[in-house]
Image: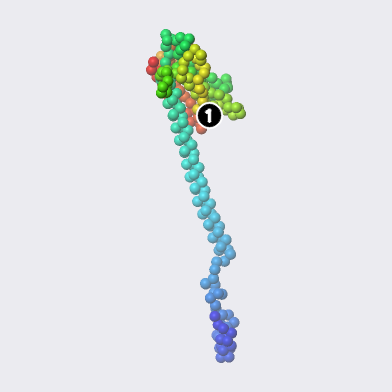
C-alpha cells in the first residue's frame, strides 16, 4: 500500500502515473482477486449443501424403512411357521381310543368351524380340542405322553380384534371334563384367518370333525392361516394313529 508521504513525493515529481496510483491504491485488502465470497455465492453454496443433505437423509430414511419392513416380514414368517409346526405336530400325534375312555380319562378330537361374521367365509376362526401324544413330561411327576390341547380365539377386551389362544391340560381326570380346565395362554393377535378342514378318505373335505359321533380320527387335516399382513400359509397333516 502506498503511504501518504509516498503520495506527496509522487505529486511533487509531477508524475501522473504516480498520482493515479495514489488516488487508487491497489492494496491487498481491496483487490477483488484476493477477496472473500459474495453473499450470493454463500447462499448458492448453502442451497447446494442443503440439497445434498436432503438427498442423503432421504436415501438413509428409505433404506432404514425397507430394513424395518423386511425384518417385520421375517418375524411374521418365523412366527407363522413356528405356529404351523406346533399345530401340525399336535394333530399328527392326535390320539383317540374309545376303548380306553372311562369317566377318569376321555380321549377326544373335536374340530369346530367358527366365524366372526356368518356371511363372510374369510372371517373363520376355527377351534380344535384334541388329546395328543406330544406332552413333554415334567420330571418327578406321574404325567404320561398323552395330554389335552386346544386352539381357539378370544375377543380382545377393547373389541379391536381376536387373540389366538392355546390351552394345555396335562392331567386327564374325571375332575376336569374333556374340553375344559388346564392352562390357557395367548399365542398371537396377528392371525386374521384360521381354517381347519378334515378328510377321511377320497376327495370329500369336512369343515368339522367330532370323534365322539364319528368314532374315529380323520386321516388328513388341512391347516390354513392368514396374518394381518396378508401373507397366507397352509399345509396338510397326516394323522398317524
On-image quarter of the N terminus: bottom right
Instruction: Give the residue pinned by disc 1.
Output: 189
Front residue of this view, candidates 214 and 224: 214
Image height of 30 relative to 217, above or below: below
Front residue of this view, candidates 206 and 92: 92
Q: Where does the image place residue 24, in percent across and percent down from the top left? A: 58, 80
Front residue of this view, candidates 185 and 229: 185
The residue furthest bottom is 13
Q: Where does the image place residue 22, in percent across and percent down from the top left? A: 57, 83
On-image quarter of the C terminus: top left
Image height of 50 relative to 109, above or below: below
Q: Where does the image place residue 64, in percent across and percent down from the top left? A: 49, 44
Q: Where does the image place residue 167, in percent across and percent down from the top left? A: 50, 22
The residue furthest left is 240
Mark 1: few/some/many CA within 10 Å (<14, 14-19, 20+): some
Q: Can residue 75 be seen?
A: yes
Residue in view at x 56 percent, y 86 percent: 6
The residue furthest right is 158
Secondary structure under tag 1 reads loop
Q: Which of the 4 image quarters holds residue 88?
A: top left
Residue in view at x 54 percent, y 60 percent: 45
Residue in view at x 55 percent, y 63 percent: 41
Q: Can residue 220 be seen?
A: no
The residue furthest front is 140
Residue in view at x 41 percent, y 14 percent: 201
Q: Which of the 4 image quarters holds residue 216?
A: top left
Amino acid at each position: 500500500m502506498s503511504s501518504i508521504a509516498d503520495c506527496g513525493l509522487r505529486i511533487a515529481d509531477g508524475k501522473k502515473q504516480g498520482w493515479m496510483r495514489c488516488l487508487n491504491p491497489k492494496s491487498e485488502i481491496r483487490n477483488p482477486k484476493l477477496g472473500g465470497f459474495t453473499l450470493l455465492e454463500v447462499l448458492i453454496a448453502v442451497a447446494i449443501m442443503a440439497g445434498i443433505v436432503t438427498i442423503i437423509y432421504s436415501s438413509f430414511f428409505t433404506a432404514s424403512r425397507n430394513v424395518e419392513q423386511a425384518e417385520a416380514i421375517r418375524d411374521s414368517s418365523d412366527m407363522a411357521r413356528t405356529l404351523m409346526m406346533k399345530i401340525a405336530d399336535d394333530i399328527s400325534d392326535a390320539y383317540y381310543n374309545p376303548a380306553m375312555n372311562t369317566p377318569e380319562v376321555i380321549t377326544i378330537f373335536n374340530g369346530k368351524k367358527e366365524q366372526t361374521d356368518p356371511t363372510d367365509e374369510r372371517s373363520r376362526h376355527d377351534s380344535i380340542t384334541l388329546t395328543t401324544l406330544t406332552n413333554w413330561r415334567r420330571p418327578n411327576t406321574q404325567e404320561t405322553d398323552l395330554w389335552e390341547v386346544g386352539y381357539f380365539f378370544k375377543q380382545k377386551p377393547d373389541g379391536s380384534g381376536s387373540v389366538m389362544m392355546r390351552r394345555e391340560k396335562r392331567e386327564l381326570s374325571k375332575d376336569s371334563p374333556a374340553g375344559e380346565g388346564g392352562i390357557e395362554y395367548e399365542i398371537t393377535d396377528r392371525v386374521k384367518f384360521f381354517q381347519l378342514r378334515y378328510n377321511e378318505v377320497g376327495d370329500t373335505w369336512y369343515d368339522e370333525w367330532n370323534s365322539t359321533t364319528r368314532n374315529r380320527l380323520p386321516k388328513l387335516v388341512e391347516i390354513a392361516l392368514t396374518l394381518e399382513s396378508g401373507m397366507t400359509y397352509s399345509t396338510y397333516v397326516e394323522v398317524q394313529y
